[in-house]
Amino acid sequence: MLSFAIPGTVIGVAYIMAFNFPPIELTGTGLILIIVFIFRNMPVGVRGGIAAMSQLDASLDEASITLGANSATTLRRVILPLMGPAILAALTYSFVRAITSVSAVIFLVSARHNMATSFIVGRVENGEYGIAIAYASVLIVTMLTVIIAMQLAIGRRKLRRADRIEAH
């Protein structure tokens, strides 16, 4: 959770200083934006995964192994389906944070790799409020669409599971 304690502007400047010289020169590339988003949002996903794993009983693993399943099958058919909602929640949170991030991104964008949020800030600075509002509206609709799609995916999984339980 240390990435939330450090301001985004400090992280942006630190990434510029760290990746501006050979042999790893990433400044001005899209890869540096991806790296920032991964490491900035990873603690939330990890904490969500830890919380979901702590709710799983160890007897599920033991029962799977007793029934002859190997570790990969247990992970794929028992653990991951139970952790699905936590994984989707972490992905949704990371997506929303990445799409609305300004502080760390403002230093890392380039003319070739611009982000919508930095574009909106640039339009506001130029006094082009109509364009900024239009882009912000598209950003909000995109976020809502992704959030609703994730909620529907989780809801359908729960409905399928309930149908299977009722069938037996």
Image (cartoon, rainbow, N blue to C red):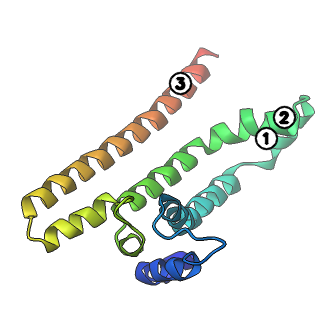
Residue corresponding to mark 1: 60
Name the amino acid type tagged 3.
Arg
Instruction: Give the label on residue 160, or none.
Output: 3
Which comes sooner in the sequence, label 3 or label 1?
Answer: 1
**Element class at badge 1:** helix
Judge from the rendering whether residue 81 lies leftward or rightward of residue 93; answer left or right: right
**Cα distance, mark 3 to mark 1?**
20 Å
Q: What residue type is labelled 2?
A: Ser
**Amino acid type, label 1:** Leu
Task: Establish if 62 lies above or below 126.
Answer: above
**Residue 167 vertical placement versus 86 (above, below):** above
Name the residue nearer the viewer: 45 or 25: 25
Taking the image as shown, residue 59 lies to the left or right of residue 84, namely right
How many discs mark residues in the rendered view?
Answer: 3
* Mark 3: secondary structure: helix
| 134 to 100, vertically: above or below | above
Where is residue 43 drawn, in percent x and y? Answer: 58, 67
Residue 41: percent from left, percent from top: 52, 64
Determine which residue is flagged by label 2: 64
Instruction: Determine the CA span between mark 3 and mark 2.
Output: 21 Å
